[in-house]
Image (cartoon, rainbow, N blue to C red):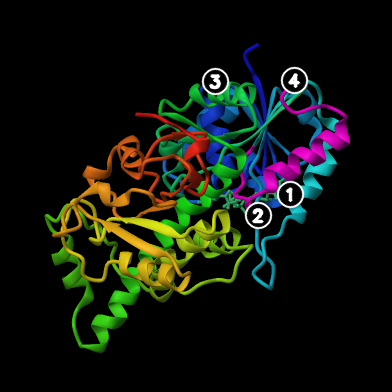
Amino acid sequence: MDPKRVSVIGACGHVGLPLALVMADVGYDVVGIDLNAEAVKVVAGGKIPYVEHGAQELLDKLLPAGRLRFEMTYGSVQAADVVVIIIGTPIDDNLNPRVDPLLNLVRELKGMLRKDQLIILRSTVSPGITELVKAELEEGTGMVEGREFSLVFAPERVLQTRAVQEIASLPQLIGAFNDVGFERAAAFFSRFNKSKMIRLTPLGAELGKLITNMARYVSFALANEFYLIADSFGANAHEIIRACNEGYPRLDLPRPGPNVGGPCLYKDGYYLLSRMAFPTLVGTAFKINESMPMVIVRKLMSLHKARKVGVLGLAFKADCDDTRNSLSYKVRKLLRNERCEIVDVDPYVAGKADLERLRGVDAIILMTPHKEFRSLKKILQAVGHDQCVVADLWNFWSVQPAPADGVYWAKNVTINE
Ligand SMILES: NC(=O)c1ccc[n+]([C@@H]2O[C@H](COP(=O)([O-])OP(=O)(O)OC[C@H]3O[C@@H](n4cnc5c(N)ncnc54)[C@H](O)[C@@H]3O)[C@@H](O)[C@H]2O)c1
């Protein structure tokens, strides 16, 4: 059955309001719920309280036509086919994500929910919260997600002030627990969004939203750090960044600026990192990259105490012969500390090209995904057996079942070639 009635909880907020407007505009019967009496009064009175292009025109059209109304109670939820939750999700004084406003709302809603509803969680949440909401709902209603109701996490990624346009045009991530949830949500969004519906797990979509924002935040911080560096030399970072970006296909640095924040970017990093210490930028990037050899060797050794290891690739990048500062050498040192015999193979390094050198190794580590290494079957043929561990953190080779961390026994997988 096509959904008709939609309740939007948090409908007078910066992103809830444009969403409510766009949905009403395509014909959904929308009730906007918000506990902020002042905001409800203003919006129901016909005024958009924020700068949001195109919103005032929609409100002027939809309110008098009775296609959208605003309330301060949850009374409409029971009759709704779709319930969208888009309330604020703040952090506390200690910079920890606050889950209580959302969970309190979910607990309050439990008595009002009914069979066959689609519940869309759209607020930005820290990883794992959709699962928590599902557990709360199932426990409180006695209904099972996927059978009696559907719950998805479908994050909002619009640019505030341009939300009306972007709601209809940005690809929509849908974190679904199952096919039913994805299909129902995709059909619902497709009515007003002509872009792609992209499926992820709920956790994947939660992380995807935070990553989307943090990628921007970090790139801004990088530009600001470049500014500070240039400044210490008395140089103009803007001029340099502009010059570097110009016509160069592999660089798209943003401009430095003193005001990088806002309600999302300020807090979302703390959501993303809620399970780890907040790292600093460039220093951390360096530490992370330089620690990857340690990660890969440790992972390998925890799966199998290898004695003879083939290191594939000595160059620092694929299809290249430059070995300067290649982390392959760091891997070799670490393997040596594990008392391993090392065989390194690299088609671009003199004397190291022959795959046959791998014969008899009991593990292989792919350090550089050269095109000559494309066939894992060929490499295993050279090894001479499949009783070896493969460490492929590049996800260069396609195998089934796909190992999450890229370290696996060759004998336990089917190679897709
Ligand atoms: N602002 C953005 O550009 C943007 C973009 C993408 C995602 N988000 C995310 O969307 C969510 C909402 O952000 P926002 O900027 O619109 O926040 P906001 O504070 O402007 O709006 C939230 C609204 O929810 C209402 N509300 C809070 N608790 C409620 C409850 N229990 N019942 C009913 N209404 C309730 C508030 O009164 C408020 O009007 C956040 O999770 C945010 O991270 C925001």
Is the CB of the residue bearing disc 2 within 8 angstroms of ligand 1?
A: yes
**Where, by quadrant of the figure, is residue 256 drawn?**
bottom left
Query: Spatial distance from mark 4 to mark 2, Cα to Cα?
Result: 27 Å
For the N terminus, the quadrant is top right
Q: Which mark is residue 379?
A: none
Does residue 322 sit above or below 416 in this rendering?
A: below
Report if residue 93 is visible in the image. yes
Element type at mark 2: loop
First-in-chain label (3 vs 4): 4
Asked if the residue at label 4 sits under 8 Å from ligand 1, the reply is no
Residue 187 is marked as 3
Sort mark 3 into few (<14), some (14-19) or many (20+) by Cα contacts within 10 Å: some
Write down the residue under mark 4: 116
| Residue drawn 52% across the image and 65% down it | 266
The mark nearer the N terminus, 2 or 1, is 2
Closest to the observer, 206 or 102: 206
State if disc 1 and disc 2 touch (CB < 8 Å). yes
x and y percentages locating residue 35 in the rendered image = 74, 47
- Closer to the N terminus: mark 4 or mark 2? 2
Query: Which one is earlier in the sequence, the residue at label 4 or at label 1?
Result: 1
**In the rendering, at what x and y percent does residue 375 appear?**
30, 37
Q: Which residues are magenta?
A: 121-146
